[in-house]
Amino acid sequence: MRVHEKSVRIAVVTHERDLHAHAVKAEMERRLPASVHIFETDHFGDGPGLSWSPQGLTEPVFPDAEGTRVDLRELDAVWFRRLGNTRTSANPEVTDPAHRELIDTDTRAAALGMLLTDFRGRWIDRPSSIWDAQNKVAQLRLAHELGVRIPETLVSQSPERIREFCGARPNAIVKAVQGVMQAPAGTITVGQELLADDAAMRLCPAIYQEFVPGRRHVRVQVFGDRVLAALLESDDLDWRPNLNIPAAEHTLPDAIEGALRAILRRLGLTMGVFDLKLTDEGEYVWLELNPQGQWLFVEGMTGLPLIDAFTGFLYGEATR
Amino acid sequence: MTVDTPVRPAIFVGQEQMTLAPAPALAQWERDLIARLEIERALHQIESMHPNETISGSGDGWDDCDYAR
């Protein structure tokens, strides 16, 4: 620890078993004059829980994972990583799905309200910015406006339009506009079975895109000014289900780095995790942005010093 | 988890849901990380995290926070 550095208190808003949070806390407290509190928001009911009053009848306190009562007014920064958890192991005695949903939604609403009301430090990042930014429709439009190459895209639930779009683009893909935690779905090729199923297409909009050929996938972590990219080599359309693949550090062209930073600035974000694809012709194609995407696994696969970089970034934000 | 249904949304036509393959090298790296950083909580002993879960410690799926509200 360097003694001249400012001592700060930082909180991570997340859920149970979040290895990202624990890794950053351990690194931060080892290296820097900082206390990091992990708020497992799905386990607030395990202890004293939340209490709040607009008249100030109680202190605005969250219990952290170690049982410490943390006054939100005394925090320098909040890493807003996750809020709630529909699949939590908490409250196993509650089996009614509606009751479990209520516990999740009302805890999230109360916790968010308390943070928005009483926390006065720096957000990494503001919840409203994160939620606006993770909308894939908005992302695609912004990336397109900023001149980033994106796949030709149709968001639709019209069977006629979908068939026309996919008919003109061999091997077109389909993916969720947002998806649901209860049934994560990978990106898949549009098949004849789907194109013949009007009822399925009509149920809700999905994202249909031209197929971008190539096996070079790029995962880009932007933490403040730092850009750390990894090249993941996979023949699969969606590399996520199988991480037993070659991966290595990757250097992006300055223009691409600049474009990604510009996207974050426009969205009011200080960090983001991008998915790109690098074609055989050497062109980078933007696929999506995850404002609070996972990145720890990239360090495990490539050796990129992401814990170190993120810890420095978070400390820097807390001391600004 | 999707169930038997006469009609399913487009993204589920042709796939049930995303399934993750075990990634033993990455899982071992995570366990080494937990030991190196002396993270007190026994994350590596959580049954649901082993052996498929190597990303977030958040369950058996991929969580890029797409679903948050």
Image (spheres, helix red, strand yellow):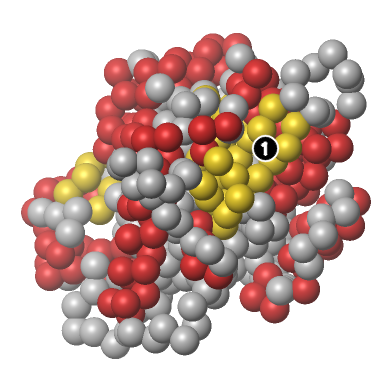
Q: Position of residue B42 (x, y in %)?
A: 78, 67
> Can see residue A33?
yes
Residue for point 18% across, 68% down: A200
Residue A125 percent location from the top left of the image: 48, 31
Tell me: A231 left or right of A82. right
Q: Identify residue type, mark 1.
A: Leu
> Does A126 appear above or below A240?
above
Q: Which residue is at a point 24% across and 67% down the rendered structure image?
A: B9
- The C terminus of chain A lies in which quarter of the figure? top right
Quadrant of the rendering where the N terminus of chain A is positioned: top right
- Left or right of residue A270: residue A20: right
Residue drawn at x 62%, y 24% is A318
Residue A265: horizontal and vertical position, in percent?
A: 43, 17
Q: Say which residue label 1 marks.
A: A231
- The answer to whether residue A122 is above or below residue A202 is above
Please give left or right for residue A266 compared with residue A237 in the image.
Answer: left
